[in-house]
């Protein structure tokens, strides 16, 4: 939703970046649909704000908030700054569409709060608390967030004047109230969301815009409706009359306008839209999950068609895109809170979906977002669970089609036997640490099987007896070669095979799933050839992620030969894949390349002419790269993270005509400075759309061969240095640095690839 917010933006950004060192709270107040969250999100994503604050975190509070949910969202937003998460989550972060939440079910609220406080101490942070309804949340925030006296800020949005006034009690000048748009602004917004408007429809269009009451959300939703109807005076006059009639309904005006847009949906889109009532308010919905659920429910037969349905809902302004992939497709989405309220109301009225907190309902679909022990009626067909909770039993749910209980802890260590009696089940997702039962093959209609395990276990051979499977995602398991003594089926429908370990990539194995489009594999603690050259036979493969851990024997052949169909490649592993990057360079359709924890021989990367002809997005994370000559003619986005030896971005990068964004994070300050110089040069050419983001590069010096950590850089650093890849030296050195805030004596001990705080004292340095 685009709103004329220039004046609001300038004022809020000035206040956020003011020179006052004390922690300040800046409320944004206004009625629902007026653009509070849009303003807050625009500020949050602004390049200046990104660079000014070392940590940014976003948490949606809403009316039915809980302390645990707030802490969970905060930790998820700040997980990159948590040393424990950084060590454990490399493969989860890199996987397509998997921005995995920090696993916190075993932590108490107090432990979570202490972790939040620990991450924020000493850093300049911006916390956005969206949609606050009570002053109790503000009291809790005052206790939770430390005042580091370094210009940290809290920004909040609320519909309630008393909440805004309470938050702003000590600084009334920082209060920001959103105003309704006037008729001209409403018309400008409406016309901006529509293609050419014929002159004969302008009067009707202006009447429609004026009837929206100055609410941006209403204008945008009506614009989405107008974009789907014929451009005739009769049709527009009728819509103008319907919108105008809602003006007299007072507080329900926006609800009437939203309902009008829903009523104009074609029949095939209505169940898809109502299904989104099953997700919590302000929940960021992963499109891959949503589409799999739509298909499993029977709303649509094919994933490609489902993606088009979602795009149609976006075009009608009923669904908001939160992230897009490098190829422009939607990665995640959400609903505006008022659209979500309307969606839930309609879903309840039609008995389509209902939210429960502790009691069963005679309803077809339920969504669980509360804790407790739950049981269900036999009429249930869909169960979605979004909070860590407990189930005593799933009962006799013979009609169940969808069961997503990844966040459920069962009363017994073993999953209920009833799981394998649910013959109609099409979608199953759960956590499990035991050997998967052979009875899994009873689920002959299952299309998606998603299991999260913490122990390395083989899958039963019976998995080969489930020919309807489309998506098999099981972390920490291995898939064994089919047993010749058991009946097996080629998994012709399998599209996604994820998170498997030590898969035997023989031709006979790969021939069992010839239509695979996504593959994610990890190899560890083994010897011999990996047979990755056989992947070339997966002629429909579009996305591939490979992780090769250091325990694998050097004697094995890891030569990778990928099919020409490949569009996205993620390589993870210390110094293992670099010789083979030249092999994937000529791939004609490769658009996304992610290189994580990858060492280059000689710390150099030379790209041959003609390689990577269609590459659009490149990520280099945790590499020893020091020199490279880029040659990516169609590159749009470049992400460089944690590459301490890289001192400059080559000038050739700035000459790529398609380049839109360069992001530098946890790198040397000289690298960040070269990125800023590139931006200034682009602006001098009139390319104001070129963006540069430099995050957490302050005080980080380039590390050179045989050089100890630069103590002066440590003194200037604004954060406590924790575990970060820094050096690959075999010898052990010790350095001492005196930090500004807080003021401890820190002993930095680094060896191999780690920099650690060995000693931490609140004392003056004894040097």
Image: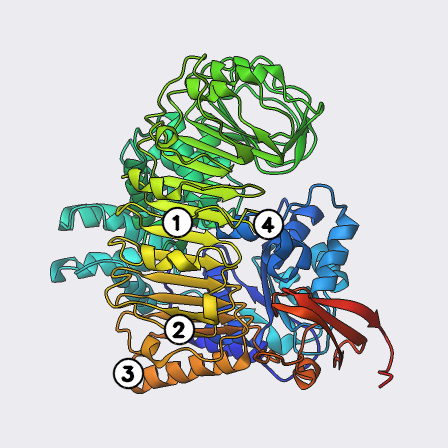
| Identity of the residue drawn at 53% across and 45% down | 281
| Identity of the residue drawn at 52% across and 18% down | 440
Q: CA distance from mark 2 to mark 1?
A: 22 Å
User: Which residue does the numbered mark 3 point to in the structure image?
Assistant: 686
Secondary structure at numbered mark 1:
loop
User: Which residue does the numbered mark 2 point to in the structure image?
Assistant: 628
Residue 62: which numbered mark, if any? 4
Q: Which corner quadrant of the image does residue 674 belong to?
A: bottom left
Task: Check the picture and name the quadrant holding the C terminus.
Answer: bottom right
Secondary structure at numbered mark 2:
strand
Q: Earlier in the sequence, mark 2 or mark 4?
A: 4
Q: Using a 10 Å C-alpha cutoff, classify the residue at mark 2 as few (fewer than 14 neighbours), some (14 to 19) or many (20 or more).
A: some
Examine the rendering and report whether any part of residue 249 can be seen.
no
User: Which residue does the numbered mark 1 point to in the structure image?
Assistant: 559
Q: Using a 10 Å C-alpha cutoff, classify the residue at mark 1 as few (fewer than 14 neighbours), some (14 to 19) or many (20 or more).
A: some
Position of 40 compared to 684: left or right? right
Q: CA distance from mark 1 to mark 3?
A: 45 Å
């Amino acid at each position: 939703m685009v709103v004329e917010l220039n004046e609001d933006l300038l004022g809020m950004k000035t206040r956020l970046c003011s020179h006052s060192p004390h922690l300040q709270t800046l409320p944004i107040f206004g009625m629902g649909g007026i653009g509070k969250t849009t303003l807050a999100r625009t500020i949050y994503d602004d390049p200046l704000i990104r660079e000014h604050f070392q940590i940014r975190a976003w948490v949606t509070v809403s009316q039915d908030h809980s302390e645990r949910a707030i802490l969970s969202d905060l930790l998820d937003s700040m997980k990159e700054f948590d040393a424990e998460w950084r060590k454990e989550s490399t493969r989860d972060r890199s996987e397509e569409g998997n921005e995995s939440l920090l696993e916190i079910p075993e932590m108490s609220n107090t432990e979570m709060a202490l972790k939040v406080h620990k991450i924020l101490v000493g850093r300049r942070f911006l916390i956005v608390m969206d949609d606050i309804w009570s002053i109790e949340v503000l009291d809790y925030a005052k206790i939770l967030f430390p005042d580091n006296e370094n210009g940290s800020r809290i920004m909040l949005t609320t519909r309630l004047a008393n909440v805004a006034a309470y938050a702003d009690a000590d600084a009334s000048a920082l209060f920001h109230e959103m105003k309704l748009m006037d008729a001209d602004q409403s018309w400008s917004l409406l016309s901006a969301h529509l293609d050419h408007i014929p002159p004969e429809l302008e009067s009707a269009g202006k009447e429609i815009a004026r009837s929206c009451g100055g609410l941006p959300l209403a204008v945008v939703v009506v614009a989405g409706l107008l974009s789907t109807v014929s451009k005739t005076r009769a049709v527009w006059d009728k819509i103008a009359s319907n919108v105008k009639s809602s003006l007299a309904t007072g507080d329900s005006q926006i609800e009437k306008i939203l309902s009008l847009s829903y009523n104009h949906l074609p029949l095939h889109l209505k169940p898809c839209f109502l299904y989104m009532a099953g997700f919590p308010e302000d929940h960021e919905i992963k499109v891959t999950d949503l589409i799999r659920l739509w298909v499993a429910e029977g709303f649509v037969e094919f994933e490609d068609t489902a993606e088009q349905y979602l795009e149609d809902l976006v075009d009608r302004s009923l669904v908001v895109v939160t992230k897009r992939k490098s190829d422009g497709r939607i990665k995640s989405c959400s609903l505006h809170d008022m659209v979500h309220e309307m969606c839930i109301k309609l879903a309840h009225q039609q008995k389509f979906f209902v939210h429960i907190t502790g009691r069963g309902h005679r309803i077809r679909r339920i969504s669980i977002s509360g804790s407790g022990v739950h049981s269900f009626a036999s009429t249930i067909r869909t169960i979605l669970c979004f909070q860590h909770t407990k189930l005593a039993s799933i009962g006799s749910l013979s009609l169940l089609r969808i069961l997503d209980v990844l966040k459920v802890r069962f009363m017994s260590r073993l999953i209920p036997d009833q799981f394998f009696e649910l013959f109609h089940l099409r979608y199953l997702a759960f956590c499990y640490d035991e050997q998967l039962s052979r009875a899994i093959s009873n689920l002959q209609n299952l299309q998606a099987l998603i299991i999260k395990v913490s122990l390395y276990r083989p899958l039963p051979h019976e998995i080969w007896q489930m020919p309807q499977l489309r998506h098999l995602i099981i972390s920490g398991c291995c898939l064994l070669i089919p047993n010749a003594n058991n009946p097996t089926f080629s998994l012709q429908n399998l599209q996604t095979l994820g998170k498997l370990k030590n898969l035997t990539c023989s031709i006979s194995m790969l021939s069992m799933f010839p239509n695979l489009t996504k593959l994610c594999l990890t190899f560890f603690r083994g010897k011999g050839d990996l047979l990755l050259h056989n992947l070339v036979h997966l002629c429909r493969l579009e996305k591939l992620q490979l992780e090769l851990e250091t325990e694998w024997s050097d004697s094995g052949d890891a030569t990778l030969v990928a099919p020409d169909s490949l569009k996205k490649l993620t390589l993870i592993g210390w110094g293992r894949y670099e010789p083979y990057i030249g092999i994937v360079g000529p791939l004609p359709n490769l658009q996304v390349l992610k290189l994580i924890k990858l060492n280059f021989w000689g710390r150099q990367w030379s790209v041959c002419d003609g390689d990577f002809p269609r590459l659009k997005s490149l990520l280099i994370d945790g590499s020893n790269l020091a020199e490279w000559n880029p040659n990516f003619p169609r590159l749009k986005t470049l992400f460089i993270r944690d590459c301490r030896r890289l001192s400059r971005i080559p000038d050739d990068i700035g000459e790529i005509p398609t380049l839109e964004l360069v992001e530098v994070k946890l790198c040397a300050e000289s690298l960040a400075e070269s990125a800023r110089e590139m931006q200034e040069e682009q602006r001098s050419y009139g390319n104001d759309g070129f963006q540069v983001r430099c995050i957490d590069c302050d005080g980080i010096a380039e590390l050179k061969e045989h050089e100890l950590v630069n103590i002066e850089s440590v003194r200037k650093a604004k954060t406590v240095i924790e575990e970060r890849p820094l050096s690959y030296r075999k010898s052990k050195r010790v350095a001492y640095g005196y930090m500004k805030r807080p003021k401890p004596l820190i002993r930095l001990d680094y060896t191999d690839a780690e920099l650690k705080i060995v000693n931490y004292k609140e004392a003056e340095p004894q040097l």
